[in-house]
Image: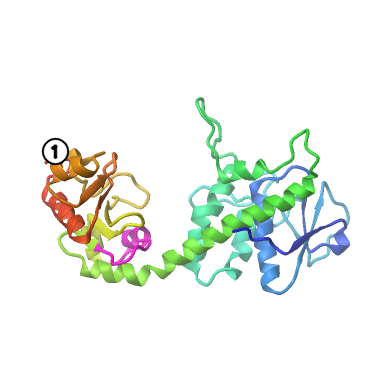
Amino acid sequence: MILKLNFELVDSIESADAITHSGNFHADEIFATVILARIFEKEGKILHVYRINDFKGNIPPNVIVYDIGGGEYDHHQIGGNGIRKNGIPYSSFGLIWKTFGEKLVTERSIWTTIDKQLVQGIDAIDNGMITKNFDKYTLLSISSIISAFAPTWNSTMSMNEAFIDAVNFANVIFNNICINAQAIFDSKEIIEEAIEKAQNHIMVLDEFVSWQYHLMTSANEKSKDIWFVVFPSLRVGWNAQTVPVSFGSFEARKTFPLRWSGLQKNDLKEVSGVETAYFCHKKGFIIGAEDKEGILEMVKIAVESKSGSEI
């Protein structure tokens, strides 16, 4: 879905609501523009952005200047413009988000989720904390994808036209991140109820919802004793997934039997002894069965086996 923002580029300070630099662009000022345009749109106004190489004289107090000029929403001055407690410096995106972001979300926890999932990574790349190039391949990021919107040397597109396209593309990304963050927030009550009902190290969800964040941060002591989560598959039947030792970790509290890893259909049915078993990821973190009874049978086998066992 293409979501076009209602914003315009203008050619003078007098007609501008916001000012950023001209020429080539990066993800930080592109996403900062998305935030400002959404705020203006929410207030029933159109954001007018002036892109300029440099500016002299006084800027009207109601004009927001970002990623240029060394002010409140720029980070190019000597020493930067602030660092988070986790060591990630702010770029213009993070500075704009810190001031204006809560006007776009309903809860502080949603603001924090978006900051972690989107803003901090862009800030880190823009400040040179994350390299994009490796010996054998190039790691694509949102920042490098946004940069690719800039016209090539033989393009007839203007830099301002490309800037507008990049902002509209970034708006789709930001919109999806917001939807996902809201969904995580909305799932808390469901997850807490499932934690309380969990038995024998197994948490069962009757519908697929985002569960990792709330399970890993729950104050309920039972949450620390859950090894596997069972839920309806988005593809076929039911799935069960291992619970990581910490949020974002690839190490599981308890693994599925190693002999299952990478097996499918008849091979997995024979090895597991579960008639409706059909899939185990080669990394062993998620399994599938055609029905709920089958997936619960598989998970109970995993609970009773020794971690890492060939059983």
Using the image as rendered, state which of residue 166 and residue 264 is in the foreground: 264
Residue 142, image x, y percentages:
57, 46
Q: Compared with residue 54, is residue 258 higher up or lower down, i.e. above or below?
A: above
- Report whether 293 appears left or right of 130: left
Using the image as rendered, state which of residue 100 and residue 257 is in the foreground: 257
User: Which quarter of the picture shows residue 159?
Assistant: top right
- Residue type at mark 1 is Glu
- What is the tally of numbered marks visible in this picture? 1
Residue occupying the point 88% across, 58% down = 12
Q: Residue 145: say if magenta.
A: no
Residue 206, image x, y percentages:
28, 67
Residue occupying the point 26% across, 47% down = 252
The span shown in magenta is: 204-219
| Residue 246 visible | yes
- Its colouring scheme is rainbow
Residue 101, image x, y percentages:
59, 64
Q: Secondary structure at mark 1?
A: loop
Residue indicated by mark 1: 310
- Report whether 148 appears left or right of 12: left
* Farthest bottom residue in view: 44
Residue occupying the point 38% across, 68% down = 187
Image quadrant containing the N terminus = bottom right
